[in-house]
Image (tube, helix red, strand yellow):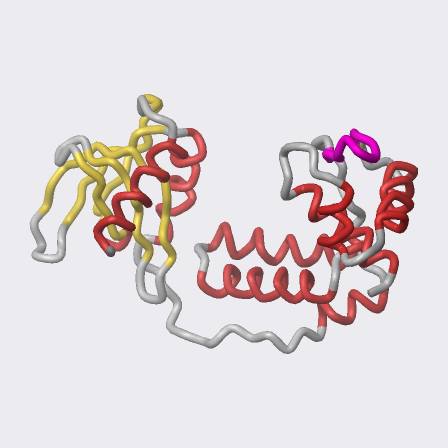
Amino acid sequence: MSRAERLLELIQVLRRHRHPVSGAVLADATRVSLRTLYRDIDTLKAQGAHIDGEAGMGYVLRPGFMLPPLMFSEEEIEALVLGSRWVHQRGDRVLAEAAANVLAKVGAVLPPDLRETLDDSGLLIAGGDPIAAGDAELPKIRQAIRRERKLGLSYRDKDGVDSRRTIWPFAVGFFEKSRVVVAWCELRQDYRHFRTDRIVKLIVSERRYPRRRQAMLKEWRERTATTEA
């Protein structure tokens, strides 16, 4: 492992800990001696990393330190390429454009050897029929999730029965043949799943729903895990 890769790994380990972590734990995680670990921390501090702590007390990385793109590992670049290619092919139009822009921005600042990894990655996404139904509404749905806003739906179920719903959306599942909004349904007073290709009409409300989406996502996951068990 090169020194640059080792420093990157140390930063990543620090980012995974919200509270001070001992030098011994950091040294073990990065597979170096304590003496080398202390030198690496001094190096990162000299490069602008806001690392609080000292030997015997533990270390914590304060928020705000950004690594230069040249410190991406080859595996991280491949992960970025693979994920962006999937989104570009299987996401809605707005997300597809965003994925292409991400790769272009990263490629513009990578050094030549790593740029070749970005351009020549052999990780491919299997082709498939584009999913058009429901895609036009996804940008509005994603915005409602980010802003924690209620959605008014005219919804047609699998039997062709129409209903009007007010939902609190907090997640979207991207499946091979469909996209599914996960939400609390005011009509059913429970969590429900809504396929975007069955949404006849959608209105984004300016009313904020009364719960935090992170709390609903956690509760929904717990219920799903209990059901599957």
Viewer-nearest residue: 54 or 11 = 54
Residue 151 to residue 76: above or below: above
Q: Which residues are magenta?
A: 52-61
Residue at 10 percent across and 45 percent down: it is 162
Q: At which x and y percent is residue 2?
A: 86, 63
Instruction: Name the quadrant of the C terminus.
Output: bottom left
Q: At which x and y percent is residue 221?
A: 33, 45
Q: At which x and y percent is residue 58?
A: 75, 34
Relative placement, left or right, of 155 versus 123 is: left
Residue at 43 percent across and 36 percent down: it is 143
Residue at 60 percent across and 74 percent down: it is 123
Total labels: the figure holds 0
Residue at 71 percent across and 47 percent down: it is 25
Q: At which x and y percent is residue 117?
A: 74, 70
Residue 179 to residue 202: above or below: below
Q: Please identify the dominant SS of the magenta region.
A: strand
Magenta span includes 55: yes
